[in-house]
Amino acid sequence: MKSSIISNSQSRSIAVGDLNNYNFKDIVVANSGTSNIGIFLSNGNGTFQNQKIYSTGLKSSPRSIVIDDLNNDSFLDIIVANFYTNSIGIFFGYENGKFKNEINISTGSSHPLFIKTCDLNKNNFIDIIVINYPKNNIEIFYGFGNGSFEDGIKYFLGYDSIPYDLSIEDLNEDDYLDLVIVNYGTSNIYILFGFSNKIFTNEISYSTNHLSNPTSLIVKDINNDNYLDIIVANSNLRNIGFFFGYGNGTFEKQVLLETTLNFYPKYLNIDDFNNDKIWDIVIVDSKLNKLYIFLGHGNGRFEKYTTYDIFLGSNPSSIAIADFDNNNQSDIVLTNFDTNNILILINYSSKSSIRQINYDTGPSSSTNSIQIADLNNDHILDLVYRSESNIAIRFGLSNGNFSNEIKYSLGNEKMKCQYITIADLNNDKQMDIITANVNGDNLSIFIGYNYGEFYLISYYSTGNGSTPFWVTTADINNDNIQDIISANTGTNSIGIFLGFGNGTFNQMISYSLDENYSPYSIIVNDINNDNYLDMIILSEYVSGDGYIIILFGYNNLTFINKYKYSTGDNSFPFTMTLVDFNNDYYFDIAVANTGTNNIVIFFGFGNGTFTKQTSYSVGNSTMSYYIIAADFNNDNISDLIVSCLGNDKIVLFLGYKNGTFQLSKRYSTGFSSKPYGLTVADLDNNKQFEIIVSLWGSGGIAILSQYDAVIFSNEVVYSTDLTLKSSSSSIADFNNDNLTDIIVAHSATDDLIIYFASINNSYSKQIKYYIGKNFHPEYVLTCDINNDNNSDIISINTKNNTFSFIIGYGNETFNEKQFIYSTGDNSKPIFALSNDLNNDNRSDLIIVNSATDNFAIFYNFNYTLFHNQQIYSNKHSLKPTDIIIIENFNNDKYPDIAVTFSDGNLNNMSIYSTGNNSNPTYIDIADFNNDYQLDIVVINKGSNNILILLGDKNGSFQNLISYSTGYGSKPESLAISDLNNDNNMDIIVANLYTHNIAIFFGYGNGNFSSIKIYSIEFGSLPKSISIHDFNNDQKLDLAITKPGTNEIVILFGFGNEIFLLGKSYSTNINSVPYKLAIIDLNNDKKLDILVTNYESNNIGIFFGYDYEYFGDMTTYSIGQNSNPHSIAIADFNQDKQLDIVVANYGTSNIEIFILDLIMELLIL
């Protein structure tokens, strides 16, 4: 059962006890966000009654909670540490689990952070021990047994100690209780030894290592020597420390838990979870939202661990253990701070499982071959794979994840590589990449440089109709230089390219196979132990029968004595691997047969001959495709991993020492994913291989990580706040899995919660989307606003008089930035519908406004609508110098247009002075201070500066800030983008008279860095800037017009603050190029450049070629004396083709050009 609704209770701590004397374990929670405690009375079967709330006082923010009988009346009482009111709160219990109002004990100027109870002085009265922040002390309140207490006695723990947790035990066996404190600030364990007269002294400390920042501890005998030991969670060093006790109050130096786990331990507890009467340790990782259980051996060692994935974003904040369903097995309860609930986990067990992480490469990427290697010499493995007509690279990160995709074109959009291999071809200690291009009849070689960058150096022909299907490298002629070997399926041959050691190669030497035998993969190795490399070729006969063909190598590049081994009739073999499976030190061969849905093993004799095949079924209709060998279970024996195109699964065969195998696991990669290429690697350094698989069907890369999963027979979630307001709900399929998900609007907490459905109709996965402070979303609906076939969200925000549009991506993620639109001052919208009211195939919104007694209709939401495309004239015969993107500045549901005029003012609905003699020449918009409101930047050519106007939601602007572009610079135009990848907008300015580009890097708060200058050619008079990634390196570049030299030029960016000046392209004599637009006009997946040529009255087009190169300019006339100035691109007529709009300075008009399929430009 799962039941959870989120609020702001921010549960911090939890305690368990029988509050109503029913012999069931009840739960009490400290809710710091709502300043109360919540009581969940047990039903005795693992379920609980609804929460009962008791206030701890206004803004008290309780941080810790315990249960004990303070007044000896046989009813448990509740004690809480009220952090902000500097007090200990006590709720005295009486019949049936009820409690009296809170009474308080002051802690003075200290904030109580943690609390424990115990009879410290053995007088049968319960005492209270408190950790005080920031006083770095503990305070003891000795009890009188009637619910009252003596004044506190404090013990200072040292400057900057920051005590975090404590335990109470008799460490030295003197019959007096001692205190063990873990100090976060000084990274140590501090022990105070108890005596008979309420005194603690003879303190001793043990280091948990410098900057370990321990957060939790446990005291138990974990090695069965009858002496207490200490276990501590070192949060910063991300390890678990053991201090084994000698029984006299002293301990061994810290010993760390031996584990390959990459985790962030925060909270600890201990119990016997698998009923073997040995202590196990449970660890809570608040950062990664995981729970780990380490199973003990009884000797102080904890090796095997199991993992439970807590809800994403839950941030668990405490843990308790009890048997909630009375079956004599320990259960777990967690408080989740960020999701404001408690999670109860009933009946522990475990099983081997797999965790899958997908990296999307696009549905048309046809990802097949995949390889892994350290491409940038950072000692972290990187991925290389095919994506459409490119190779794609994702660089590995230290946490086992991968960077965004970087693509390198194969040089032709129709080129498709079938296989990729990686080697150092030029002996520069950097990896190079070779691709076998099936439809190009050639190999591509990409040379690595700059530790992670690549360039296409050459193609090598494999012969007409050769269709190279596989490529590998080896030193085939023993000259210590890598050679290339290709399997040419189309010509039934093997090609050898002898290397020169500098990344170049000789022409192909061809070795023909028997007629009608098509090679599909090849392995080069010495299989007959004669110190010459041999070729093992997996081939397919014309009938579909499969064969392994072996060519034995000699010292003169000759290969003879062809041996053939059948892989089966109609087997259609595709891949193979060469490994010693039976530990006889001879190579064996394993083959994946697509046609017969099996794998076959050939055991070698060490002389180049092999046994008859041994076959293992993979399953009916599985289409076993790709096979690799690896030691997947760390038993020093090779296992086999197979990808299955037919049923979208990865199959694992575990190997035995004698070379036999057993089908062990089947792992699904998702519906219609069609897993193809395989490789394995230990990506996160946990001594466990991950499986990396390319998904040919769905497009993507999947990382499969094996782990031992914690399984609970029952998982129950209870909200910890009764003040919740669930104001509205809606349903949609947000992740395109054909299951109905639920979205709930919570007005009181200003957020939306999305519950994702699973196949078993549970809703365990959930995410929160924060709308905004005091927005109060009262109604939520779902629809596809932007016609991308993914569900979007509309939130009606009553208190804020707005609605929010949140774009969905169809994969459980949403645009972080919501689009917010006003419904009118004091309108108080409460309800909305979505429909196409005017039959334009776009969703319109009808919103009911409760306070103004009306309803509002928003037509064509999120679309710019133009009727009757024609030439639009500007009034007052003013000369427009720039047109910016049409936007809704004042949230009035109509698009507004801002135009600059050279008389010193902005002429629009509102007028803002830009200064005397400022001569504004360019205007643009962006959100510079991350407040979700559009801001304006203006170039003032006369005053040599840029002016920033920060926008309000009502369409007005304020806080005018100016930045100099340099003395005499005469700035002409600007562009806006995030050039240095810090998620803040930067401003790029073209300085006409100083012949340079100025960049102001944004800080995200409306302020910018000092000017950075990038010189262009003297006399170039840079006029306009456009920003795009022209060379496909995933870094933004700048295209610039140079009217002074009648050229355009590109500055290539490096993703930081560095730019490299590239080649210039002529726009013809006296053309005077002004403004730019970038688009792929001819649908060849390469960017083209459009430029307005002011004096030659035309548009120039530079069609993109490979990478950073462009062809000669093609021109289209605008008309005599038109003087085209600005240019922009959009789909004005909704025909799903981009059109061009040009602002003509000479004729004072704008013209729209509609692009047809053959790219003819027709003036309307």
Image (cartoon, helix red, strand yellow):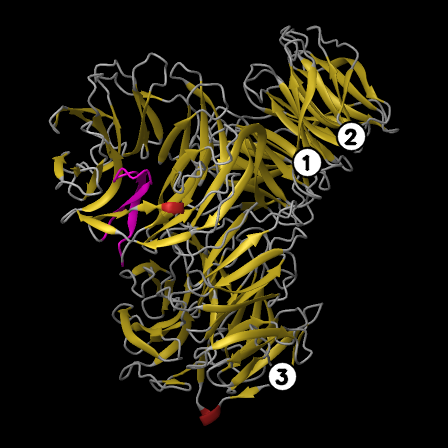
Q: How many marks?
A: 3
Q: What stretch of residues is rendered in magenta? A: 58-84
Asked whether, in this view, residue 296 is left or right of residue 190, the answer is right
Few, some or many residues within 10 Å of mark 3 (<14, 14–19, 20+): few
Nearer to the camera, 1039 or 248: 248
Asked whether, in this view, residue 214 is left or right of residue 42, the answer is left
Name the residue carrying label 1: 676
Asked whether, in this view, residue 737 is left or right of residue 593, the answer is left
Few, some or many residues within 10 Å of mark 1 (<14, 14–19, 20+): many
Q: Give the residue type at disc 3.
A: His
Would you say residue 1073 is visible in this rendering?
no
Tag 2–tag 3 contact (CB < 8 Å): no
Numbered badge on residue 867: 3
Q: x%, y% of residue 1097? A: 54, 78
State the CA–CA distance, disc 1 to disc 2.
Answer: 12 Å
Name which quarter of the figure residue 844 lies in. Answer: bottom right
Examine the rendered structure and indicate whether residue 1008 appears above or below residue 1128.
Answer: above
Q: x%, y% of residue 810? A: 60, 55
Examine the rendered structure and indicate whether residue 1095 appears above or below residue 711.
Answer: below
Which residue of the protein is positioned furthest toward the bottom in this rendering? 876
